[in-house]
Amino acid sequence: SQQGEEDPQALSIQEGENATMNCSYKTSINNLQWYRQNSGRGLVHLILIRSNEREKHSGRLRVTLDTSKKSSSLLITASRAADTASYFCATDAGPNFGNEKLTFGTGTRLTIIP
Amino acid sequence: DAGVIQSPRHEVTEMGQEVTLRCKPISGHDYLFWYRQTMMRGLELLIYFNNNVPIDDSGMPEDRFSAKMPNASFSTLKIQPSEPRDSAVYFCASSLSRSAYTYNEQFFGPGTRLTVL
């Protein structure tokens, strides 16, 4: 079964609004990553947050992590049409080095309406 | 750097035929992953390699699927014989081991869209 579950499955907002997506996971992690997938393309890494971090920013992206609730959120501010894509969270296998497998969630399909 | 390269980009074949998908990881990366993506099952990890050695193939659906990595710059995923339910987009990704200075973000190829008739 998937480690990560995104919520909502689909989200449509007007251009300029903020978009928030959530991810829940089940086991302890070393880091959590967010990826974007444009239609017909491979996934692209957006941002990584370590288990000892609570919030991280990158441009219009803000990621939070709550390890006590095993959840993370991705906020995209001032959305643009080009942000239309699917967004996935991915978790690693834990704090031990040597196992670099990532488990991807089910994804949130974000549509920005111009 | 050209990124992860996959070929072919599209493959249409008939049931029962052998299909070979190819991947060239980013130079210097020591991990290589094969994924399959469908609407019904999402993104599934099939198998991954570390330093050309298969580490975990528990995601390989059945014996019809096999993967090899003969060297650090090339991997293949083979399906023999292919079936219509194998139709999906197959992605290859590569990454570096984690260290004090690097994280295990994965770099994905553009994918191969496989259609089995």
Image: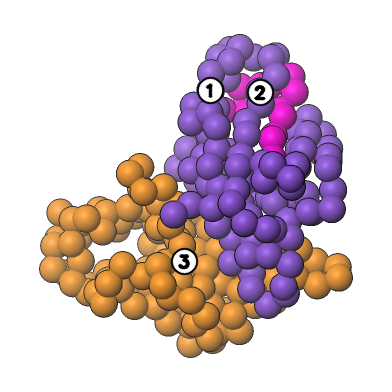
Chain colours: A purple, B orange
> Which residue type carries mark 3?
Trp
Q: How many marks?
A: 3
Residue at 71% over, 28% down: A76
Q: Is residue A25 left or right of residue B37?
A: right
Label 1: which secondary element: strand
Spot occupied by residue B71 in the image (x, y as percentages of width and height): 54, 86
Image quarter in which the N terminus of chain B is found: bottom right
Q: Disc 2 to disc 1, how far (Cα)?
A: 8 Å
Residue at the far front in the pictured view: A68
Residue B3 visible in image: no
Magenta-highlighted residues? A72-86
Residue at 46% over, 66% down: B34
Q: Looking at the image, is mark 2 or mark 1 earlier in the sequence?
A: 1
Both labels 2 and 1 in a single chain: yes
Residue at 68% over, 77% down: A98
Which one is in front in this view, the residue at disc 2 or the one at disc 3? 2
> Which residue type carries mark 2?
Ala
Q: Nearer the viewer, residue B26 or A108?
A: A108
Question: Mark 2 — residue?
Answer: A19
Residue at 32% over, 53% down: B88
Q: Is residue A32 left or right of residue A60?
A: left
> Given the image, what chain letter belongs to the residue carrying mark 3?
B
Spot occupied by residue B75 in the image (x, y as percentages of width and height): 47, 77
Q: Is residue B60 above or below residue B116?
A: below
Q: Is residue A9 above or below residue B107?
A: above
